[in-house]
Image (cartoon, rainbow, N blue to C red):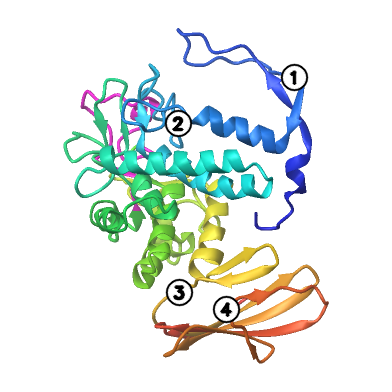
Amino acid sequence: MNTGDIGILDESLPFIEGRPVKAEEDSYYDLPERSEETASLYEHCVRAILRGLHFGEHGLPLIGSGDWNDGMNLVGIQGKGESVWLGFFLYDVLTQFAEVARRQNDISFAERCRSEAIRVRLNIEQHGWDGQWYRRAFFDDGTVLGSSDSPECQIDSIAQSWSVLSGAGDVERSKTAMESVNQHLVHHDQALIQLLNPPFDKSNLNPGYIKGYVPGVRENGGQYTHGAIWVVMAFAAMGDQQKTWELFSIINPINHGKTKDEMNIYKVEPYVVAADVYALPPHVGRGGWSWYTGSAGWMYQLIVESILGLRLDVDKLRFTPCFPVDWKQFIVHYRYRETVYHITFICSSGEMKVIVDAIEQPDQFVQLIDDHQEHSVEVMVPGSKVREDCTIQ
């Protein structure tokens, strides 16, 4: 959707074939074969979405043997467990793919996506809200995971973050949920943001192999950096400049290695992203599994899109900045193919303005043109103060 090259959706691709997982199996290892059947990439997407439209008794998507957190592989192992987070994610997929289907002139499926998204959203609000945050999941037997009544994993960050990022959460509830994240999962003294708390340890809850990790390590109550980045992105989406920068500073690896003492705690490279940071004494603040490209990609997106606010829409550049309140201005040198746009963001007391080569743009975006020239852009951002000497290439 960013590039506008939808021709790829018409490309014909094969499927892969393998036997179904047997009822008594959790998984199996095999080498799948290429199917003789082919379909367009668009049809592959449609089939994948239809496969995901399987719901439990609360009308939430089945978690199966794991959603984003595959360590929760036993929550829905019997085929009845449901994921609240997956509900938010599915809502996001459905609302975005509805537009893809419309562009493909598949109006009936576009409407199906919209109606299913509305149904999922209503079910999340009816069954997923716990009072101060959104629940995480329901076990096969209906036991709630991620509730204030849960002995462990009372709050999980990704359900709260994605209530904001997906746009599916009730605005006031999402605000309350993110306040709960800040209260229960953000630890300034330890410079980390937990994925969930309390960790799984001695209760009867058995979500799967996540419980095999020592409490406070990796997904089991440590900082799993994927989830921490989503927390910061959610605060940025809410327009909270102070909290966004404050939490970005916590998870920015360079801030874990500014002194010898800090490096003796962190113990991994401070110039790359680590998958996790331990919250387990005496190893609190220690990084693990560094050079983690998945989190690095999200970190890049957080910086460019959420904080600096550059959002590419085919051949248009839009702006939704959420930078620190004490900055005065900064410059981004943005290359569009063989053309460079020098974009200066400036604190303004008035309304937001976008000025390209001294001409104000009424729609407040830059129409990108690859004319091999250099262009000057000014983005006047209201309600912000920007630091003077910040230049980004």
Between marks 4 and 1, how big is the CA–CA gap?
Answer: 48 Å
Q: Can residue 218 be seen in this view?
A: no
Task: Magenta stretch: give its range.
Answer: 193-219
Identify the residue under disc 4.
364
Q: Is the magenta stretch mostly helix, strand or loop?
A: loop
Residue in the image at 38% along x and 64% along y:
238
Identify the residue under disc 2.
70
Category of crowding for the residue at label 2, using alpha-carbon neighbours closer than 10 angstroms: few (below 14), some (14–19), many (at least 20): some
Using the image as rendered, state which of residue 355 and residue 221 is in the foreground.
355
Identify the residue under disc 1.
35
Element on which disc 3 rests: loop
The image position of residue 138, as x and y in percent, is: 30, 29
Residue in the image at 39% along x and 55% along y:
164
Between marks 1 and 2, how big is the CA–CA gap?
Answer: 27 Å
Is residue 84 left or right of 372 when viewed as pictured? left
The answer to whether 323 is drawn above or below residue 312 in the figure is below
Frontmost of labels 1 and 3 is 1
The image position of residue 303, as x and y in percent, is: 52, 65
Identify the residue under disc 3.
323
